[in-house]
Amino acid sequence: MPMLLIKGSYEILGTDPDGDTIHFRPDNPDEWDLIGGDRKVKRNAAGRGKLRLEAIDALETHYSRTGPTVHQPLALANAARDAVLEWVGFTSVTRGANGLVTASTPASAPGFVLTRGVDISHRCIAFAGRGEPPAASGIQVLVDAAMLELTLNHHLIKEGLVYPLYYSTLFHDLRNAITTAAQKARTATPPKGVWAEDSTVSGATVTGMSSITEDEVIFPKLFRRLVDYLNLGDTDLSGFRAYLDQQADRFLILPTGQFTTGLDEVVQVSGTTVKMTRNPEDLVFDEE
């Protein structure tokens, strides 16, 4: 899969990184504009922009799209965040009362990103690397499964710290490599990371917001939809599948080859139990 390589540094001062997002400043900020597509990376005067790590979805540490800020079970959510910071090269991080980073050692960490696009929030969608890049900055490189295994994204999946989350822009060979790593983490003895507590397919008991913020570990995309539904003001889950239909997520179900609209196609609700009928790696979403 051809991707643009951009060399630079990870910088976290004044930010609130999580398990699938971190800020990055290219050595040459003009290289942000080499990314194809109509969207541009939002960046500050120094060129620092935000990365959204490709092909993964971490437990939420702060989600607030439709109401007060909420999170998923923090032990695992913070474990993914801390693994991101440690892997790219930060040895210590100090945060203020508001959660923002006030100091770090080192002040920045060298690395590179491999990217093909920018998301609707103007974040660079990327595979993240550390240290010296394998090629010159600002050029297209062929990213195969071997190179993927050297990225932060693969590390997080391999350790079971995040879920797979695929969009149609990702080539199948890289998707398959992520799936293999995720399945190994899930079937390990004992299961790694989130998989030891995951109730996405087995069924999560949802009696209110605290069920999914404190207790149940589920696919973050499902979590976000549940939060938005509960923020409508009713804990009665009988309307949740209809709500999912209204959101009109478009996706392919890989095992069947069925292209469909609405997560209600792969979600079941019985009383206070919510579950997906497919594992996250079985779904490939249209780009948002």
Image: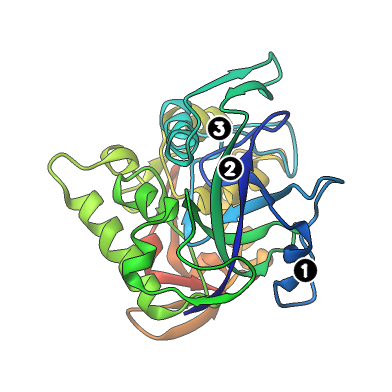
What amino acid is at disc 2? Asp
What x and y, as percent, mark residue 198?
Answer: 33, 43
Residue under circle 2? 236
Crowdedness near tag 2: few (<14), some (14–19) or many (≥20) residues, C-alpha within 10 Å: some
Nearer-N-terminus badge (1/2): 1
Q: Nearer the viewer, residue 137 or 240?
A: 137
Q: Which mark is residue 208?
A: 3
Asked if residue 157 is positioned above or below residue 88 in the image, the reply reads below
Q: Nearer the viewer, residue 113 or 58?
A: 113
Crowdedness near tag 1: few (<14), some (14–19) or many (≥20) residues, C-alpha within 10 Å: few
What amino acid is at disc 1? Asp
Q: Residue at x 31, y 39 (%)?
A: 193
Q: CA distance from mark 3 to mark 1?
A: 44 Å
Q: CA distance from mark 2 to mark 3?
A: 9 Å
Q: CA distance from mark 1 to mark 2?
A: 47 Å
Q: Which mark is residue 33?
A: 1
174 vs 37, left or right, is left
Foreground disc of the pair 2, 3: 3
Q: Mark 2 falls on what kind of element?
A: loop
Asked if residue 67 is positioned above or below residue 256 in the image, the reply reads above
Asked if residue 107 is positioned above or below residue 153 in the image, the reply reads above
Q: Is residue 163 visible?
A: yes
Q: Mark 3 falls on what kind of element?
A: loop
Outermost top residue: 97
